[in-house]
């Protein structure tokens, strides 16, 4: 029997899952349609699901986003068996006030000129949908799933707190 995945429309479920994971793998489409991924630091997610990333205006990802705003973000915390995939649309934001609002001194390693660097831009990502896998990392759960499979021939079906899709649109 195929796996049944719970569906929610509550973006806060995704925000809650990623709030403590700072690095995402961001995937954009190159001009020829091939995919390009790179690690990106996620600033504190907003409650409505808006995600912010600092970048350079002359970076390849900016030109990719200007051609195709669709992006994918992958988050992982293997120690907790937590994995999140997010699909969204990205917009380039060069608003100096927003850059200063989100700026932290820790960013100076990537932007030595500080928040006044004219080459700084933000990528604002609006979440459209996502999916998470959050299974307890316990020997007891694995033993239960194994025993159930042996006895009934059925695999463990994760509940909505373990595996769910979020459709924001």
Image (tube, rainbow, N blue to C red):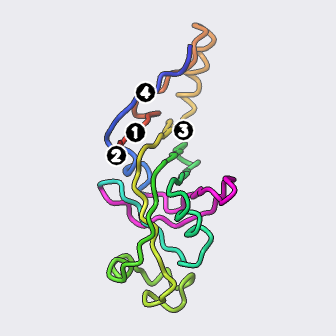
Q: Are marks 4 and 3 in contact (CB under 8 Å)?
A: no
Q: Are marks 1 and 4 in contact (CB under 8 Å)?
A: no
* Secondary element at image label 3: loop
Does label 4 or label 2 sit earlier along the sequence?
2
Location of residue 120 in the rendering, given as x and y in whole percent from the top left corner? 49, 81
Q: Please name which of the two marks, 4 or 2, marks the residue nearer to the observer.
A: 2
Look at the numbered discs 2 and 3 and tell me whether their residues touch, using CB distance below 8 Å: no
Contact, mark 4 vs mark 2 (Cβ under 8 Å): no
Side of 17 where 63 appears, left or right: right
- Foreground residue among 119 and 3: 119
Q: Is residue 37 left or right of residue 43?
A: right
Viewer-closest of 114 and 18: 114
**SS at mark 2 in the image:** loop
Mark 1 to mark 4 CA distance (whole Å): 14 Å
Q: CA distance from mark 1 to mark 3?
A: 23 Å
The disc placed on residue 11 is: 2
Label 2 with label 1: CB-CB less than 8 Å: yes
**Which residue matches tag 4?**
159
Marks 1 and 4, the one that precedes in the sequence: 4
Residue drawn at (53%, 85%), measured in percent from left and top? Answer: 111
Q: Residues within 10 Å of mark 3 (few under 14, many from 20)?
A: few
Q: Are marks 1 and 3 in contact (CB under 8 Å)?
A: no
Determine the secondary structure under disc 1: strand
Residue hosting label 1: 166
Magenta-tinted stretch: 20-47
Dot 4, how many residues are within 10 Å of its Cα: few (below 14), some (14-19), or many (20+)? few
Q: Quadrant of residue 31?
A: bottom right
Q: Which residue is mark 3?
A: 137
Instruction: Give residue 73's position: percent from left, percent from top.
Output: 53, 53
User: Does 39 lie within the magenta span?
Assistant: yes
Which label lies toward us, 1 or 4? 1
Q: CA distance from mark 2 to mark 1?
A: 6 Å
């Amino acid at each position: 029997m195929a796996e049944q995945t719970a569906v929610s429309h509550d973006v806060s479920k995704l925000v809650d899952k990623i709030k403590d994971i700072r690095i995402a793998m961001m995937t954009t489409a190159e001009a020829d349609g091939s995919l390009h991924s790179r690690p990106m630091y996620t600033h504190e997610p907003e409650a409505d699901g808006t995600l912010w990333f600092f970048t350079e205006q002359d970076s390849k990802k900016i030109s990719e986003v200007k051609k195709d705003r669709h992006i994918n973000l992958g988050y992982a915390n293997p120690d907790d068996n937590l994995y999140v995939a997010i699909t969204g649309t990205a917009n380039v934001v060069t608003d100096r006030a927003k850059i200063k609002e989100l700026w932290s001194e820790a960013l100076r390693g990537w932007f030595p000129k500080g928040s006044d660097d004219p080459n700084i831009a933000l990528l604002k990502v609006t979440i459209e949908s996502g999916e998470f896998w959050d299974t307890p990392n316990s020997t007891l759960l694995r033993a239960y799933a194994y025993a159930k499979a042996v006895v009934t021939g059925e695999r463990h079906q994760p509940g909505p707190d373990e595996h769910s899709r979020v459709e924001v649109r």
